[in-house]
Amino acid sequence: MQTLYESKKASLEESLLNELSSDEPWSLIERYTTLVRESASEDERVAFQYIADRLEALGVDHTVYTPELFLSVPVKSSLEFGGQTYRAKSPAFSITTPAEGITGETVRIEKFAAGRSVDFFDFTPATDIDVTGKIVVVDGFGGPPPVWHFENAGALGCIFVNPGVDIHWGICTTIWGAPDLDNYERQPTLPVVSINRPDGEALMKAMEEGTVEVTLHAEMKEGWFECPVVVAEVKGNVDPDKFVLVHGHVDSWDIGIGDNAVGDATLLELARIFHNNKDNMARSLRVAWWSGHSTGRYGSSTWFADEFGLDLARNCVAQMNIDSPGCRWATEYYDVTVMTEVEDFAKQTVNDSTGKTMTGARPHQAGDYSFNNIGISSLFMLLSSMPQDLIEEKGYYPVGGCGSNIAWHTENDTIEIADKDNLMRDLRVYTASVQRLLNNALHPFDFRNLTAEFKDTLGQYAEAAGDDANFAPAYDALSDLNTALDQLYSKTESLANEAVDNASVKAYNDALLGMGRELVLINYTRKGRFRNEPAVRVPQLPDLAPALGIKDADEHLRRVTRTHLVRGVNRVTWAFETSANMVRAALEKIDA
């Protein structure tokens, strides 16, 4: 499959890489050091205007949109106990408390203690403590899953003790993007604050000595706000309807240089060099800058997925999220977000463009991955990171960006977090990846890697379910799909050097995109196409994942789970069968 991943326009790629310059991106970064780009703020508007003005000066076609986004912007927060007031930050979508605050008795959730890691999306409750009417004190970050869990358990409020001396901003709603009738009632209904480790230690020590009452204060600015979105386009010359989407968010917490001025700068440089070489592009490139990432749970990328959903479903080859590249000390590529079918392509492109080795990781339900529900194969989110031994040497804890710098989502995310050399190296990865996606005849997706993963996943679920579920239809359909895929990929060598508009190439590629629309959907969604999943962890083949808990369920829940699994097997099997039929139809055209 080497021919599927390597550049078919090596001289063009080399020219693009040589054309990369730090001038345009670094100028944006320096400009953004003066802007606190809170969504719907004047500084954010200025930041977007800067991008639009530079695109205009560079001659890049672009459109400025102003969608209404549903936002929750923290204004001020505090925590009172023991006669003192402590500094606090509320995550977006905490409630606003009454003027007198909300007072209650605290309860410690020791078993949760999420390893002082980013537990936003991978949360498993492990406590039988009654929290009804209490304010829980939790060791970790205040993300959506724990807030949702404790709210449903009857808690009065939540205090999250962050790992270090700084308090990290965040967001605690599970609703992805603007609410709809399916999810608007999931908006949090309790106050949430985060405090730093020293203050948290003082609180927990007081709790060890007796009952402690605390008062939470939180003020939020919440509602519907017009926010800017900029989308640039470089039209392809052979198959212009097909496009690659690269994107990142402009809004920030505080100055937000590592998260995500560096990403905005990267996007601008990509728009510049691909525009300068537009006559050599077969497919089109769309470059998008979002608002409402941090205070709207990916508000404008979700708006874009809604507003242009049909075009994305019909024509988007792949999406690439660019968040926190080029940060201080971030020199390695491990646990890089990438879908299984495109992981080998990403690994080779990283190695070809930097000489470094990459390891991949399944995408979290996070980071403007607002296109899973369309079925788009995706690569990247965070890219380069600090070496693990350096993280340990500095005593850093895991965070969700800034190349592993713990300035992430704090006031310390300033110009020092950006690194010009690392940014230019990461730009090489993005440039090579985009060039190959735009110009290689064949889309670089090996779905056999994904079906091998599916086989392992089915095995785990089938073993857990035992006689409670029949996975045979899914196994049979998967086997049939693999046979068809082997036949399709046997055509790779003969087609890889054909033109993008060759009829057999188009049949091959259409089959890959069609499969993605089915297989990505069943691997990352429960809700189905064009419906948003909650911002919580989505396991592999989520319709079948309840098999893991069926043996521990009571008799009623066990029967309910059996019904759920029958429906899940039907959905998964149908996707496998549909994909196999697409491949066979393509083979008929190729062999004609």
Image (spheres, rainbow, N blue to C red):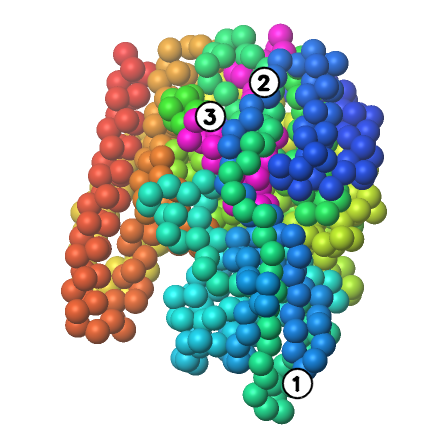
* Residue 205: mark in rendering: 1
Q: Position of residue 278 (x, y in %)?
A: 63, 11
Q: Is residue 210 above or below residue 571?
A: below
State yes or no: discs 1 and 2 in contact (Cβ < 8 Å).
no
Label 1 CA crowd tier, 10 Å (few <14, some 14–19, many 20+)? few
Q: Position of residue 464 (x, y in %)?
A: 28, 65
Q: Which residues are magenta?
A: 278-307
Dot 2 falls on a residue whose secondary structure is strand
Dot 3 falls on a residue whose secondary structure is strand
Residue at the limit of the structure toward the bottom, as seen here: 209
Looking at the rendered structure, the kind of residue marked 1 is Lys
What residue is at 38 percent from the left and 24 percent from the top?
A: 310
Q: Position of residue 583 (x, y in %)?
A: 30, 27
Q: CA distance from mark 1 to mark 2?
A: 55 Å
Dot 1 falls on a residue whose secondary structure is helix
Looking at the rendered structure, the kind of residue marked 3 is Val
Q: Give the residue pinned by disc 2.
A: 63
Q: Is residue 43 above or below residue 74?
A: above
- Residue 493 visible? The answer is no
Depth check: 47 or 17 in front? 47
What residue is at 31 percent from the left and 40 percent from the top?
A: 528
Label 2 CA crowd tier, 10 Å (few <14, some 14–19, many 20+)? few
- Residue 567 visible? The answer is yes
State yes or no: discs 3 and 2 in contact (Cβ < 8 Å).
no
Q: CA distance from mark 3 to mark 1?
A: 54 Å
Q: Position of residue 61 (x, y in %)?
A: 62, 13
* Residue 162: mark in rendering: none
Depth check: 419 or 48 in front? 48
Which quarter of the rendered picture does the C terminus lie within? top left
Q: Give the residue pinned by disc 3.
A: 317
Looking at the rendered structure, the kind of residue marked 2 is Thr
Residue at the limit of the structure toward the front, as seen here: 99
